[in-house]
Structure formats: C-alpha cells, structure tokens
Image (spheres, grey):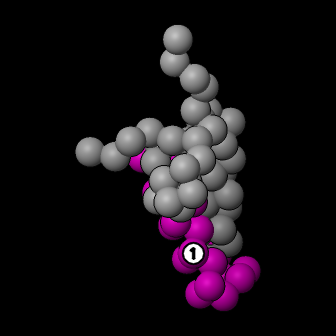
Amino acid sequence: MFKSNVGGLDRGGRIVVGLVLVGLTLAGTIGPWGWIGLVPLATGALGSCPLYSVFGMSTCPMKR
C-alpha cells in the first residue's frame, strides 16, 4: 500500500517519541497538543512517511 521509506533506527525513534507524547498527554502532564504524537507513532508503525516521499528521501537501507 505504502512504499517503505523509514529505516530501523528512524522507525524506532518515531515510535518511542510518539508513545512518550501520547503517554504524557494521557497522564495530564502536557496539554492536548501532545496528541500530535500520533503522527510519528503512525509513521513509525507503518514504516512510511508522506513527507519523505514528497522530498524523495528514505532512511531504509539500500537493497542490493
């Protein structure tokens, strides 16, 4: 469905940042803007970033 353009380290970082932001929002530590954490969480989980596609970027290792 989506072309994979998010590599392993990038993907893991996105998931961690997303979970932290959503967790802090649920805990009431930060305001509702923390729901923006759903964006990196989703792109990390799917392995595809729309902005990377627009700019022709990829952090996936090159296939041989």
Q: Is residue 30 magenta?
A: yes
Whole-percent x, y for residue 14 in the image: 63, 52
Residue 18, picture quadrant: bottom right
When the figure is inspected, residue 9 is found, relative to residue 15, above or below; the finding is above
The residue range painted magenta reads 26-46
- Residue at the top extreme? 64
Whole-percent x, y for residue 27 in the image: 64, 75
Residue at 51% across / 67% down in the picture?
A: 38
Whole-percent x, y for residue 39 in the image: 52, 66
Q: Nearer the viewer, residue 19 or 61?
A: 61
Q: Nearer the viewer, residue 36 or 54?
A: 54
The residue beneath circle 1 is 36
Residue at 55% across / 77% down in the picture?
A: 35
User: Left or right: 20 with respect to 32?
Assistant: right
In this rendering, does residue 35 appear at all?
yes
Q: Please name the predominant secondary structure of the magenta segment in the image.
A: helix
**Circle 1: residue type:** Ile
> Which quadrant of the figure contains the N terminus?
top left
- Report the label total: 1
Whole-percent x, y for residue 29 in the image: 73, 80
